Amino acid sequence: MSVRIKTLLAAFLLITACASQSNGGPAEEARAPGPATAAAVMSVPADRWRAILVAGENNSPAFDNGVEALQGKLATRGVRDIRALTSDPEANPSLTVATSENISQALRATAGDACLVFFTSHGSESGIDLRAAKGYLSPSALAVALDAGCGQRPTVVIASACHSGVFLNGDMRRPNRIILSAAAADRVSFGCGAGDQYTYYDQCLLQSFDGASTWRQLATTTRTCVERLERTMGVPRASQPQIFIGASVGDLRIPGR
């Protein structure tokens, strides 16, 4: 590939980066889990998981596509309680609109023994964009919703957006939580253009899902896939996906595995 083509491709990738306006900031690096405050949990029956899947933006089909694809994989694994939220209610009239209030209500709505929350959207250092609500979901607001809706249950949060490393902050870190982010706090992620089927991170997550047994394994294989894809595409500044694994869920298995 010529230098000129590589330069043009890199510029295009920057244009289609999944970011909102941001002032920049230091990357949030994953830290080693602290001491356990609850008994370790390795497995939860698939029908005892509840999943909240959120497409926060509607200016690319990649977001709703990611939600739909993950919903299908979870259902195949035996997860019954799956609630999908959208920011494109005209195209998805049967789905709940993605707002902070509706996300919080969905987390409180049903019983279960484990929680999975997946967001795919644009993002900034303020949080995840929720276009239909004309706002965003901040890490502190999500932490409050998780405390109320999931409590001490094993909880997995997947934040797929630019700057989503902000969700690995002190409010979010708990021994019972696993947090995956598509980018460091000061980095953008890629693949949310009008012609993209999935974001880069969602594509790698979905590709890695069937081969993973634990959330830790899925997190690391997804990150490796993103790094490889970004090198292939000539991304000038890597997104640096982040991982936090709480002490009591270090070996937590994916539903149905």
Image (spheres, helix red, strand yellow):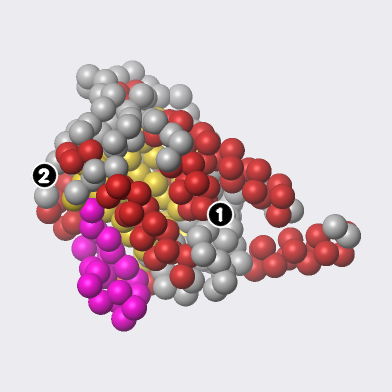
Q: Amino acid at mark 1?
A: Tyr
Q: Secondary structure at mark 2?
A: loop
Q: Nearer the viewer, residue 142 or 161?
A: 161
Q: Residues within 10 Å of mark 1 (few under 14, many from 20)?
A: many
- Inter-mark Cα distance, 2 to 1: 33 Å
Q: Quadrant of residue 98?
A: bottom left
**Percent position (x, y) of residue 80?**
19, 49
Q: Which amino acid lies under the numbered mark 2 shown in the image of this protein?
A: Ala
Residue at horizontal 11 percent and vertical 44 percent from the top: 111
Question: Which residue is under mark 2?
Answer: 111
Q: Picture coordinates of residue 185 (x, y %)?
A: 52, 48
Please give left or right for residue 169 compared with residue 112 in the image: right
| Magenta region | 82-103
In this view, the residue farthest toward the front is 76
Would you say residue 212 is visible in this rendering? Answer: yes
Q: Which residue is labeled 1 in the image?
A: 200
Report whether 125 appears left or right of 256: right
